[in-house]
Amino acid sequence: MLEPGASLKGYRVFVVGPVTDETGSRFNLNVTDSLRTQLAARLQSHGLTVAAAPPPDTTVAALLVTSALEGFRGMPFTLQLEGPGVTGCTLRSELRDAHTGRRIGEIVASVLEEGIRPMWALVECAHDVADAIQRQLRP
């Protein structure tokens, strides 16, 4: 969902900011780093330029993507193991102009599947956010 009149089409650099964990779950892996890495890698797989910080040249349009893991369903202490039941996550990403701080929009990715590894649900959420950004850049 983009703000009225906002567009991602002019952005050339994508800064993947920190991911926070708002679930209260005790994971056996650092899921916030994993989500950040997956999001950046997926953006790069689409041919987009990903940077750790906004470029110093303010004429280069940079989009800051900060995310929060808002929901998790599954067994957080066995992320790599497949198990019975439903596994899911909700990842909310806010999009801001990296130079001005102006809010451009947000993306909410939600996955709910049965019988998958909990880690795969998290990866799917990160990929869904990156894919949504890429779709907004298409002509």
Image (cartoon, rainbow, N blue to C red):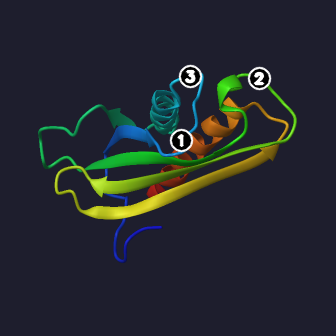
Asked if marks 1 and 2 touch (Cβ < 8 Å), the reply is no
Q: Earlier in the sequence, mark 1 or mark 3?
A: 1
Classify residue 74 as left or right of residue 3.
right
Residue visible at 53% across and 41% down in the picture? 24
Q: Which residue is mark 1?
A: 24
Above or below residue 133? Residue 47 is: above
Badge 2, how many Cα within 10 Å: few under 14, some, many 20+? few
Camera-side residue of 76 and 89: 76
Camera-side residue of 43 and 19: 19
Q: What's the CA distance linking mark 1 and mark 3? A: 14 Å
Q: Quadrant of residue 95?
A: bottom left
Q: Which residue is mark 2?
A: 81
Above or below residue 70? Residue 121 is: above
Residue visible at 21% across and 40% down in the picture? 54
Q: Secondary structure at mark 3?
A: loop
Badge 1, how many Cα within 10 Å: few under 14, some, many 20+? few
Q: Can you name the residue that lies furthest to the bottom here? A: 4
The residue under label 1 is which amino acid type?
Gly
Asked if marks 3 and 2 touch (Cβ < 8 Å), the reply is no
The residue under label 3 is which amino acid type?
Leu
Q: Which residue is mark 3?
A: 29
Q: Secondary structure at mark 2?
A: loop
Residue 19 percent across, percent down from the top left: 42, 39
Classify residue 82 as left or right of residue 90.
right
